[in-house]
Amino acid sequence: MPATVILGAQWGDEGKGKLVDRLAEQATWVARFQGGNNAGHTVVLGEQILKFHLLPSGITRKECHLVLGDGMVVDPWVLDSELNGWSDTTGEDPRGERLFVSERAHIILPYHRYMDSLDTKIGTTGRGIGPTYADKINRVGLRFGDVAEVLNDGEWAKATVQRMNASLDAAGSQERVSVEGLMSDIEWIHKAYHTSIGNTGLMLDNALKLGEHVILEGAQGCLLDIDQGTYPFVTSSVTSRGNASHGAGIHPGHVKDVIGITKAYITRVGHGSMPTELEDEVGNHLGTVGHEFGTTTGRKRRCGWFDAVVMRHAQRINGFTGLALTKLDVLGGLEELKICVAYELDGKEITELPSTASALARCTPIYISMPGFPEMSLSEWLAMAVHANEAGKGISVLPAAAQQYIAKLEAIVGVPCTSVGVGPDRDATIDCV
Ligand code: GDP
Ligand code: IMO
Ligand code: MG
């Protein structure tokens, strides 16, 4: 079986966790390949709401092996607390049994968090992501595979602490790190993770050669990609298809399906323009009915109409083989649905995303209008999805206006929908037939 890549096609929070949990039923491995605990992925199993920041969302499937891959930045304390939470609910400690951390993944240390806490420009999650990737690119980062080597290396610790304190001082931070603190952190990380650190790329490659199914779980979304996103209001990693196999340590030839996840509207957390942003009743409707609050920081997500300019860009970068549409239910009750098909920029109509933040800020959306469909309760949507899947009816069970809306999105993006989400629950997804 080949690998399947699951990617956010917008500014993150499209519902990756829910889809990965669903598809992981058919997989034996789920690997994260970039980002860190800036991610917040939600899985809803009836009354139980699980939120994952580092643990791959396939952890819900007992047969699934889990990888924190080469391209990630991992905060070992956050991982530990997530693992403790998991063990409290299930009694399982998957470390070294079915959870493996790449020897190439970089470690987020307190220093990186202190540096990130100084951010006022981007509206980061404050989790130390950017500073850890900066150290990686500067080739001074600490990787899980280095931990055993630096364990008793006082010279390394001294030089590292000197470098970190000089940076903190230059950045105007009052925080400082110490040699003793760093050495004791390294000792703890070694103790906590030495059984689970390994060559995870090789593990995935071997699994694929044995015909097993691997899911590569993206974090963030295409518009937050460091190269292809709305720079500088982006995250510090490549969130796109090109990095899915690379960041997991396997070659791109293993990948067959690439599913782009998109909400039926759009949201964004943090700074930076979002041309279709709505600060009116419709925006309130989307935020309230969709419970649009950040899974990691709890910040209110900014909401707007579906933006086809964004999706065209995401499709060019990622070549999705299918779209997973989520949160269609949230549009229920709106009389009119708008889709942004182009922008007006300095008096001209454009259909491609501009590359600079200042140009994006001057863009105003050009909309087409579609009829809305009635509101329903979450339990009604859930029942509809269960019935559609059991009877093999696909989206034909949806109101005609909802089907028209989906058909329009498919036509604009040029990619078929593989599933349509109609509620947060694992089973509130209609498989397209
Ligand atoms: P991720 O970061 O892409 O995994 O997405 P998040 O978990 O941060 O945010 C998505 C939110 O939408 C979560 O609260 C999900 O439970 C919820 N969600 C996912 N799919 C649907 C859907 O189809 N309908 C509704 N109403 N909620 C959904
Ligand atoms: P998931 O995987 C939504 C945003 C932050 C900020 C910018 C940079 O749950 O979709 P960072 O801490 O990465 O340096 O912040 O990126 N951001 C996300 N927004 N979902 C996420 O992850 C995000 N991860 C980072 O809000 O604007
Ligand atoms: Mg999220």
Image (cartoon, rainbow, N blue to C red):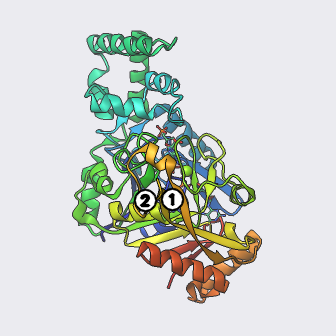
In percent of width and height, residue 29 lies at 38, 59
The N terminus, quarter of image: bottom left
Q: Does the residue labelled 1 lie within 8 Å of ligand 1?
A: yes
Assign a secondary structure to mark 2.
Answer: strand
Identify whether 203 is placed above or below 336: above
Q: What residue type is labelled 1?
A: Lys
Residue 360 showing in the rendered view: yes
Q: Name the residue under label 1.
A: 16
Q: Name the residue under label 2.
A: 7
In-front residue for pair 195/282: 282
Q: Residue at x 49, y 22 (%)?
A: 114
In-front residue for pair 9/433: 9
Residue 431 showing in the rendered view: no
Mark 1, Cα crowd under 10 Å, few <14 / some 14-19 / many 20+, is: many
Identify whether 410 is placed above or below 231: below
Snapshot quadrant of residue 241? bottom left
In percent of width and height, residue 214 lies at 35, 63
In-front residue for pair 46/127: 127
